[in-house]
Amino acid sequence: MTSEPLRPGDPATGPGPAAPADVVARQRAELERLRDLAATTAVLERAKGVLMAVTGCAPDAAHEELLRRAKDGNRSLLEQCWLTLGALPPPRERPAHPAPPPVSAGAGTGDSASAGTGDSAEALEALGRDLVRVGSPHELAACLLDRLAPEVAADAVLLYERLPEDGLALIGHAGVEAALAAQWRHVPPVPGLPALETLRSGRPRWLEHPAEDRARYLLIGPPPERWLTRAWLPVPEGDTARVALGVLRRRDAPFTPRERELLRSVARLCAGRLRAFDSPRDAGAGDVSGTVQAVFDALPGQAVLLTPLRAASGEVTDYRIAAATPEATDVFGRTGRDLVGRHLLENYPAVADAPLWRGCLRALETGLPYASEPFAYQDAGVPGPATATYTVRAAPLGEGLVVTWLRYDPVDRQEQRLSDVQRLGNLGWANWNLLTGEIAWAAQTYTVLGLRADRPPLPLERLPELAQPEDTRPLARAIAGLVSRGRPLDVPFRTGTAMGVRHLRMVAEAVTAPDGTPVEVHGFVQDLTAQRSAELALVESEREMLLQRGTLEAERALAARLQHALLPLPSKPVRLAGLRVEVAYLPAQAGIHVGGDWFSAIELPDSDALFVVGDVAGHGIDAVATMAQLRFTAKGMVSTGSSLTGALARLNQLLLHSRDGQITATMVLARYDPDRRVLAWAQAGHPPPLLVRGGEVRLLDRPGGMLLGATAAPVYESLELRLEPGDRLLLYTDGLVERPGEGLDAGFARLAEAVRAHGCGESGSLDALLAAMLADERRDDVCVLDIRMPREEVHDATATPSVTDA
């Protein structure tokens, strides 16, 4: 912490022990001023000599010429002197390795000091030439770091400007990361800040003892140990200083007298350049900033005129604020004409390469205005960041841009959110003051009610006039109860609009006085037309589904009765031609349609037995009718002497010429000769029979045959199988082995495994086999013929001795 020095002669304090220190400080300051004056005089005399040599004028005329050139170029006299000296031809280059000067017995510190003074003069001369070409505080900081790095081991340069409220603003920096610069861009007037104390006292601060400095000052970091020594110099030196120049070094060593003198000279040299940044430029042919500023002074709102700053390549590198309205405010609190002369990126560095930056470039190139979407801008500062939402518009004017912006405060955002909620929810609020008669409606309320926005809002008691005749009385009663007794209402009603009938809902409540009398009503009206239409469509769909389901169930019942009439099932096993035959038919559990699976097991006139299993594609009445047609036709053709393959060929033609050839079917035909114990069989696209013999289970190889109704010229073949005592043969439809997502080979393997597990030959149970195979829900009908050859002729009390059809 530091404090302001006591003024000598203050009657309240007396001389005190601090008076001698003040005297010494003033004497040192005066000595430094005299040294600076001597250095400035030397530069001035050198510049006058150059003009005298070039133009041949007198010394006084050369001095006046320097003053005139400095005024015309908006430069200080010292800058003009360095510019004049910089126009001289470059000095002859020194040898790469100059020979060391001879050391005499009298050589000492005086020679070293002289050499140091010469080096400083050359550094100042080079810096003076460079300063003429810088165009902003950022460029000035970069130029200083480039020149001071080899001279004083500088690692970073900062330029802080004193704000009207006694805070600091970072206007230029070099050697510092962007994140750190943003964090320390705006510094409030906190105690212990070296830059601020330098400006208050008007004297440099030399921070050369890291441990003591960290305890005494608030150091820029992080971490503060990064720069072990620092120098802060006022620009210009004295009470009028408004800019603090900071030179930060990693070197842990005090500044030498030569380095201190050089830095003071640099600070004085920068004073004129910084003043030039604040001065308005000479008006060019296309410059309209003066006229625009005069207009801006009379305008409300926030607007600035930006003139682009371009590099040598023509690329826009920044914008300068050439005019500003009185209400224009930046993030540091500067307003109006205080913004003029400042650069855009100095105040808003995050704008670089953002959509706003690209939009402004596009406006300059195309001449068309640019309007941004709302965006959030966050400016990092001390003690914390600040975020606001903006919309910006940029319009070309001459060679510049007129930029206006609107900042949204929390109230604006809340109103926008409320408007969005009403629009998305398709509702609008409304207020009625029952004492004053004042009515307030949201814009969305007119939309919901189907009214024009230019009409006055309706009183509460007239709202029922908007309802359909059937809904007028319920709405009027609810409003009367709300107004008289303060009873909340939530009433649906319909209203007619140009777009048709709308289904609305009104919700409202009353604000009551202390005695319970309603004094104000607030609520909302919501459009539920889309929801109500969806509900009605759902009810209609459910009604149609129930009607359709009833029709389908009636069709199923009819088909089931027809199926049972055409396909009677025996109640117990039957005996045909010496074989024991058991039949199982299981309808599908899923769906409401009846399938086309069927079977026949009959004894032919020549004592042979005919076994048929078939499956008609599809369900319902058509499938049952086709099943009956195939069943009776097949029995008739085989009974009258047709071969098995011939019967299949005729049945194929029958399906091709019935119902436009849209029905197909699969079938197995088998004829058993009891004298030879031979089973001849043929098939039309049907799963192969399963044979169980001597404990082995296998599928029979199928003879050739295409499913019925698929082609006009199919080829059907037949095979013979000799049955042995104890054999078991299963004929079945595909519903027994098919499962969703599983191939037929897997179904056949599962059937063989189930037969092995539940007994082979005469000991196997058909019911147990079906239970194992059909544990899950059946998605298709299942029909099975279980044919067994007895091991020996015995009387079976449970079997029918002979049948003509099972």
Image: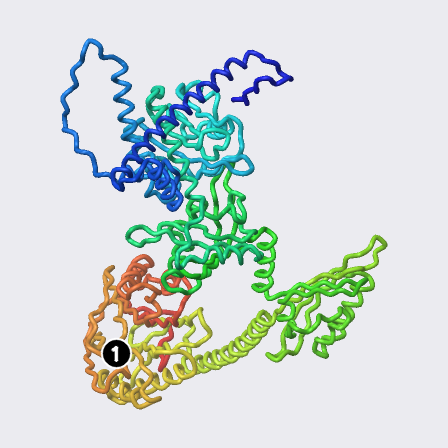
Say which amino acid is labelled 1.
Ala
Badge 1 local density, few (<14 within 10 Å), some, or many (20+)?
Answer: many
Secondary-structure class at tag 1: strand
The image quarter containing residue 464 is bottom right
Per the image, the residue denoted by label 1 is: 684
Number of numbered callouts drawn:
1
Where residue 725 sits: x, y (%)?
Answer: 24, 67
Res. 372 visible in picture: no
Where residue 435 sits: x, y (%)?
Answer: 81, 62
Res. 724 visible in picture: yes
Where residue 197 sits: x, y (%)?
Answer: 50, 27
Q: Is residue 639 above or below residue 179?
A: below
In this rendered view, identify the residue nearer to me: 347 or 418.
347
In this rendered view, identify the residue nearer to me: 668 or 301.
301
Considering the image in quadrants, where does the C terminus appear?
bottom left
Q: Residue at x 53, y 27 (%)?
A: 191
| Colour scheme of the rendered structure | rainbow
Q: Is residue 804 above or below residue 188?
A: below
User: In the displayed structure, does residue 104 sit left or right of residue 515?
Assistant: left
Where residue 290 sits: x, y (%)?
Answer: 48, 55
User: In the displayed structure, does residue 19 sit left or right of residue 724?
Assistant: right
The image quarter containing residue 610 is bottom left
Q: Is residue 446 above or below residue 327?
A: below
User: In the displayed structure, does residue 96 sit left or right of residue 608?
Assistant: left
